[in-house]
Image: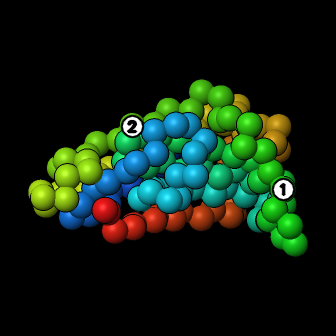
Amino acid sequence: MMLWDDEYFYFAADMEEPHVWGTLTKRDSVICNDNDFEIFIDPDGDGENYLELEVNPLNVVVDLLIYTASPEWTGSLAWDIAGLKTAVQVYGTVNDSLQIDHGWTVEIAIPWTAMADSVSGGHRPNGGDIWRLNLYRIERKGG
């Protein structure tokens, strides 16, 4: 789900998963090695200067600014989404393969101000605007 207001771009995802697990606990780790939910925001759709955000079931975040992805990846892992808000709710027990889990939910609020200079050109979408987004979920088997 997605929506926005004057201050934030909001995302929520509900993921069914029989074994919720996550191992990475440090911000800006390679979270895609865990189960995660990922957001890519490239308002003008040119494949340059776009935001990547990943959150795992332990509510650990990696956020980066991608300058180019092709022909060679360049970006900034040091870039942070100032004022980012995330929350995770697990329906089960993380990292317990003996129990069957129901899954997990993630909620995200990205402030427009954090994207103003580097991603969105200083504005949020207006009625009729078309923005390029990719929402992605990685589900790896635990253990």
Decide if residue 26 is on the left or right side of residue 74.
left
Decide if residue 4 is on the left or right side of residue 24.
right
Name which of mark 1 and mark 2 comes first in the sequence: 1
Q: Position of residue 16 (x, y in %)?
A: 26, 63
Quadrant location, the C terminus:
bottom left
Residue type at mark 2 is Ala
Q: Position of residue 119 (x, y in %)?
A: 77, 47
Q: CA distance from mark 1 to mark 2?
A: 29 Å
Considering the numbered disc 2 on the image, is that residue within a helix, a strand or a loop? strand
| Residue 117 vs residue 143, the one in the foreground | 143
Quadrant location, the N terminus:
bottom left
Decide if residue 50 is on the left or right side of residue 7.
right
Decide if residue 90 is on the left or right side of residue 36.
left
Residue 74: which numbered mark, if any?
A: 1
Q: Position of residue 118 (x, y in %)?
A: 81, 42
| Residue 7 vs residue 37, the one in the foreground | 37
Q: Which one is in front in this view, the residue at disc 1 or the one at disc 2?
A: 1
Residue at image position (70%, 31%) is 113
| Residue 100 vs residue 122, the one in the foreground | 100
Residue found at the very far bottom of the displayed protein: 71
Q: Which residue is mark 2?
A: 87
Residue at image position (44%, 57%) is 34
Residue type at mark 1 is Thr
Residue at image position (59%, 64%) is 134
Task: State yes or no: discs 1 and 2 in contact (Cβ < 8 Å).
Answer: no
Q: Is residue 70 visible?
A: yes
Residue neighbourhood size for the residue with mark 2, other residues' Cα within 10 Å, grouped as few (<14), some (14–19), many (≥20): some
Residue 89: which numbered mark, if any?
A: none
